Amino acid sequence: MNKPSIASVLIVDDAAFSRRMLRKYLEAEGYQVLEATNGQQALEIVQQHQPNCILTDLLMPDVNGFQLLQILRDQGWTIPIAVITADIQDSSRQRGVELGAARFINKPVKEDEVRQTVRQLLHQ
């Protein structure tokens, strides 16, 4: 019998505290967690591991969250992505949606919201 594969979630955030917190929430749900500190690292991880979904911050050095969304879309990836941000401006949300973000989570994150969002992303 084949064991069901464990879903992998890529967390992209330059803040170590945020990554650690998200990792704790997601590992408690049984997900495999991958981490990147910026969009450039995230692109390399996507190429190597093809995660099942991505949670990304917007404001990061090198390649930011908007650029990450744009590059993934341009490369033809269809991985569901949630943006985690403290930026609640409508223009930022609109731009994220246009670039392919499926969900938004406001900072500070709530554990239940993170778990529910990842479940929704994985079952789209």
Image (cartoon, grey):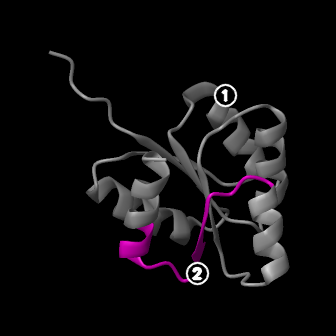
Magenta span includes 107: yes
Image coordinates of residue 43 in percent, x first then y, are: 72, 38
Residue denoted by label 1? 47
Image coordinates of residue 92 in percent, x first then y, are: 81, 74
In the displayed structure image, the side of residue 40 where residue 21 appears, left or right: left
In the displayed structure image, the side of residue 18 where residue 31 appears, left or right: left
Query: Could you say whether the residue bearing mark 1 is in a helix, strand or loop?
Result: helix
**Which mark is on residue 107?**
2
Magenta span includes 50: no
Residue at image coords 75%, 50%: 39
Image coordinates of residue 65 in percent, x first then y, are: 76, 59
Image coordinates of residue 63 in percent, x first then y, are: 83, 52
Q: Which amino acid does label 1 sit on?
A: Gln
The image quadrant of residue 50 is top right
In the displayed structure image, the side of residue 97 where residue 123 appears, left or right: left
Magenta-highlighted residues: 99-114
- The answer to whether residue 112 is above or below residue 122 is below
